[in-house]
Amino acid sequence: MTTLKFDLDAQGIATLTIDVPDRGMNVITPELTQELAAAVERVASDAAIKGAIITSGKPGAFVAGADLKDLVTAFDKGIDTVEASKSSFELSALFRRIETCGKPFAAAINGLALGGGFELCLACHYRVLADDPKAVVGLPEVQVGLLPGAGGTQRLPRLIGIINALPLLLQRSHVKPAEALKLGIVHAIAPAAEVAAKAREWLLASPSAEQPWDSKKFRVPGGAGPLAAHAMQSFGAGNALTLANTQGNYPAPHAILSCVFEGTQVPIGTGLRIESKYFGKLLSGAVARNLIRTMFINKGAADKLANRPKNVPKSKVSKLGVLGAGMMGAGIAHVSAKVGIEVVLLDTTQEQADKGKAGIAAKQAKDLKKGKTTQDKVDAILNRIKATADYADLEGCDLIVEAVFENRAIKAEVTDKAEAVIPQTAIFGSNTSTLPITDLATASKRPRQFIGIHFFSPVEKMPLVEIILGEQTSSETLARTLDYVAQIKKTPIVVRDFPGFFTSRVFGTFCAEGQKMLLDGIAPALIENGAKMAGFPVGPLAVSDEVTMFLQQSIYKQQEADNLPEKYRGKVGRPVIDKMVDELKRPGRRFGAGFYDYPQGQPKKLWPGLKQAFPPKAEQPDVSEIKARLLTIMALETARCFEEGVIATPIDADIGSILGIGFPAWTGGTLSYIDTMGIRAFVDECQRLAKTWGPRFEPSDWLLARAHKNEAFYPRSAETETA
Ligand code: NAI
């Protein structure tokens, strides 16, 4: 398989064109590395060759970097640190050979060049970039828990200085052409069709084949030159900032800082070895694997609807009816109208419906003011939404999403009224957050076409949609619902019907555990900080305030009324909720008072009265215990969901827990968390926590049996198991 074309012209300029077959984008494969190495040796050894251009055969894209799927294969095989460092150093050594082989190399960057693709460019002596907004360059490895392991952390600081390089290595992954030129990471920009000609022009002018960092002018031979006077200080500050941002959960930013700090004080050859060593550690560690597997591979698979029932033709919603123009209904109408769906937004009165639409108009106006959209687009979106109180307007809708009050009787009434108007083939979806779908479907004359479509708030921002199958939901209904979720560009997970489904059930354990900690005499600030240090976006007390304790109380009451078995009730938090709502009248943020105070125009503050209401004990546990309780209880509840078939695959659990309920991404999701710890160590930890904090931490017999067999949720490849 040829991935690289080699052309030589009459003037002695070689053109190496990268074109990896069967890929939309060029990625660095073992074949490409091999062929590139051979081509570089040919350029180096053939006296007739003056220099070489490296470019891509794919229009608009140079090289996108490593293939994440290859990395996951490496993870599955159980790559170790030494092996990972060695394989990274092979590519790094090839790039070093390019810059030291004695012949000038020019990168004609005809489009996007990221990660390893851009590192290849940095190893060339000259870089010309396409003048096209899509032709971004950068080193985004930190986002997948890695670092640029083929010279990126060494060349970039030597090229533009440490202070300029760090933000590009740690935060800003994509740099547009004009800025790339200004920063000095490319030498020139030119129209995409002319980059190769420009590179040729440079080569024909008999340029030097030496990188600045290899020149004698550098004060430390081959090194970075002395660090800028304030660089030491900036490393100190950078380290503190990185620690604050990552809470120590993400090792990549620290590894990048170490590479730059250690690597720029020594000659580049040594720096590259240091970089490979750190890269190997990251690649063989759990965080990179978890991030890549869940957030890039599995999320992509879910986006592409891997589990969509076959044999159902692809469908598109053209007319959507949304019942209830409140917070959720308006959001659902908004995201649907944005992708071109005609929407009927219905509420009890015209005034209520208009209010919902006005909220959408206000959000659009904000976007317009920020320059994110145009007046034409705003008008088109708003014109697609008809606010109404008249059910007759629902005629012709292929899908209904119901988002009225969380009340069975009201939901039954609107189901009946809508079904009288909509086509026989239409699907009826409910956005209920807690009520079982099978129950709600009893109000429908077409239970096979009844399904749960559970959005998250705010709908515009939250990427997840939880699809819930009622007992009678047909596979065609599921397929068409998945098509709708794809149409509005959200990521679906599919779950079985159960009170709280998957996400609310697991999320409930997070809130309840935080509330129970108050009863255990743990200081509120420790609870909140412990959650943040574990990587949750907000603590369980703040989030309880957000969803309101009224709602949590009504869920507990509903669970009681439904006679839900004890083990499913978040009753450990119940005394706290009842006290906060009934006695202290502090039900949450919307009411101006909850676990926090909400002073006007100022940031919220933990309510000082909490200390009297739930007196903290003199002796406080270590923060690691807070982290362990929160992470473990959610992972354990997920395992129960898996055991009971509420979720069918670990992928659904992992994506759902990260995208829907803020489980920390470094874990890879609730089930990846168990795998990362090792299932045996996990059940030991559960049993330890059960002894100290209560039987809710007790693992089930099913989980214990699984641990006994050491059965992971993501089995490693057969190759490793036999290895
Ligand atoms: P909301 O109170 O903001 O809106 C409900 C809307 O339904 C109101 O505009 C109300 O006038 C309307 N409505 C009530 N009875 C009606 C009827 N008979 N016919 C037509 N319209 C009627 O409530 P929200 O937060 O939008 O929740 C709606 C549904 O979405 C509930 O089932 C809730 O459990 C669920 N949900 C809520 C989430 C949240 O974060 N708030 C998240 C996911 C689901």
Image (cartoon, grey):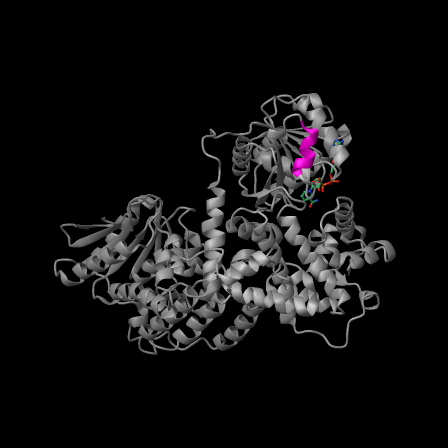
Q: Position of residue 217 (x, y in %)?
A: 31, 75
Residue 486 lies, in percent from the top left, at: 52, 38
Relative height, residue 129 to residue 324 (above, below) = below
Q: Is residue 166 left or right of residue 409?
A: left
Q: Quadrant of ligand 1?
A: top right
Classify 188 as above or below 398.
below
Percent of width and height locating residue 22: 31, 44
Mark yes or no: residue 173 visible. no
- How many numbered dots are placed on residues in this image? 0
Range drawn in magenta:
437-444
User: Which x, y percent locates residue 9?
Assistant: 16, 50
- Tell me: residue 98, above or below residue 363: below
- Residue 694 versus residue 35: which sits nearer the camera? 694
Which residue is painted at 72% across and 36% down in the image?
404
Q: Is residue 699 left or right of residue 439?
A: left
Q: Residue at x 49, y 70 (%)?
A: 254
Q: Based on the displayed image, in which of its 4 quarters is residue 258 positioned?
A: bottom left
Residue 523 in sight: yes
